[in-house]
Amino acid sequence: MNSPFVVYPAKVVGGILNPVYYPNPNVKPHYGVPLALFTLPGDLLRLEIVPWDAQATNDSAYLIVNNGSPQFMKTIQPGDVGRPFDYSVPKAFLTDGINTLVVRVINTVQPGGTDSIDLLVLVHTPRPGGEVAGSGDNPNLILSMSHTNVGPTEAANGVDAKLTYPYMREGDDINLDLDGRTYPHKVSATEAQLGRVVIKLFAKDFWQDNQRFAIRFRVTDSLGNTSGPLAIWSAPIYIDVHVKQPPLNLTKPDVLEARLSNGNVLDFNNDFYTATHATVRVKYTGSDPAQRVYVECMGRAETYTTQPQPGPAAGQELLVLIPRRVIIDSIGHKIQFRYYVRLPNTTQDLPSFDRDVNILPQRHICGVPTINAARNNLRLYAPNPLEAQYTARISCTIDGQSRLDSIELPYPYPSAPYMDFPIPQSWISSNPGKTAYFNYSIRRTGSTDPIIFSPYLKVFL
């Protein structure tokens, strides 16, 4: 309204002068109002009302918020003339975004009232992520990672951190904490519209190897309102980071029972005769528990493969047990040992260098047994002729179970091309559908000489 005097706009006590209004930078707010300025009780915002021109006793002042109904503030009393006064506005009167505040003065000079210019006040409510009661992790700040195991390959290709939270605004400042180091990010208009932020992290961001590399984030909007207010941070996500590991060097495995010729020869009678298993030691540069490792043994007639298991920690070793039958089956032959390593989030198994171990023969080399169609007889092929009287015993091994052994019977002497040995029927009837390994052994009668073992015959029952 036209008036011979000027009414000045209010001042926001403690407000931020001339903040940026990111949705439309052409709009120039006079004040930004951090939520901390609303005081209890009543969530009130304190305004300072500046004396207007020709202020006089009985002048009345009103405040108009967002073109609403005028709110009475004060009638000027004697002694008030020329002095500013405070007035508090409830937060409930203000909306998220730009608000207009107008001071209207009614006096005898201008009974219809004189208005100040619009005071543009920027308010962000609720705060980023919304209001969360109490402290601890903020359940409204949601973080997810595209990978939870990050090695050199993943770090080179990039790992996505996806962040979502309610009341996301353009210009929000995100502090993504990467195991103690800050990664700043300002929310764009597109991200605010979508309601999510995706930050691609690379090797430089995964600044240290850590099996529990902690990632979390907090948010501060352009007016300084933080997520929370006490539950500032998202719940952390822990990922396994192994970016700075040295390159893999998959050296030969060691067979601990192979003690001759630099680990390449196993003396069965002296170093393995009573052993229940062989022990393969796996140790290599670049090892990590996030990798998967298995051992392969290529023997006389069969390749035995162990179940994959986590790799050893850096500088440590992995001991893998190989069943006794694998060694016995290759007496007098060679076994090729190697291991394979699969890196996290890959499908390729990387082979190590081979370790060829020769198993020294025993006094006699026994032939592989054969089984008849009825599966009630095993035919044994000891050397012909034998130099002395021997007894024979047959065995049936099923992996994961105890070995089954027969009684001992005399082997034909002085000579015979073979010996037929009856198979106990319970061995067959109690193990249907399983894989059985049959072999036999001969013992020199009246002697303490080592028992001599034949190779194995693999049979599907």
Image (spheres, rainbow, N blue to C red):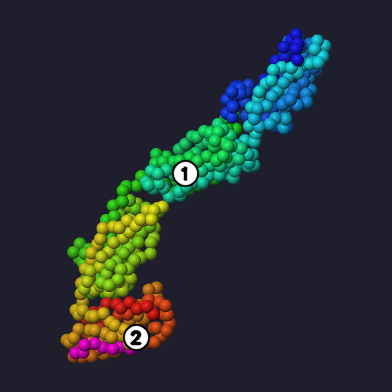
Range shown magenta = 415-423
Left or right: 192, with 199 as reference point = right
User: Residue at image x 70%, y 15%?
Assistant: 8
Q: Amino acid at mark 1?
A: Asp
* Mark 1 neighbour class, 10 Å CA radius: few under 14, some 14 to 19, many 20 or more: some
**In the displayed structure, would residue 275 be above or below residue 176?**
below
Q: Does the magenta run of residues contain 335?
A: no
* Percent x, y of residue 434: 40, 77
Q: According to the image, label 1 marks what residue?
A: 160
Q: Quadrant of the N terminus?
A: top right
**Quarter where residue 433 is shown:** bottom left
Question: Is tag 1's residue or tag 2's residue first in the polypeptide sequence?
Answer: 1
* Percent x, y of residue 137: 57, 44
Q: According to the image, label 2 marks what residue?
A: 373
Q: Does the magenta run of residues contain 420?
A: yes
**Quarter where residue 392 is shown:** bottom left
Left or right: 447, with 429 as reference point = left
User: Residue at image x 26%, y 88%?
Assistant: 419
* Percent x, y of residue 347: 38, 56
* Percent x, y of residue 417: 21, 88
Q: For the residues marked 1 and 2, what is the alpha-carbon distance in whole angstroms?
A: 61 Å
* Mark 2 neighbour class, 10 Å CA radius: few under 14, some 14 to 19, many 20 or more: few
Q: Is residue 311 visible?
A: no
Q: Quadrant of the C terminus?
A: bottom left
User: Residue at image x 28%, y 89%?
Assistant: 420
Q: Is residue 431 visible?
A: yes
Q: Secondary structure at mark 1?
A: strand
Q: Amino acid at mark 2?
A: Ala
User: Residue at image x 23%, y 80%?
Assistant: 366
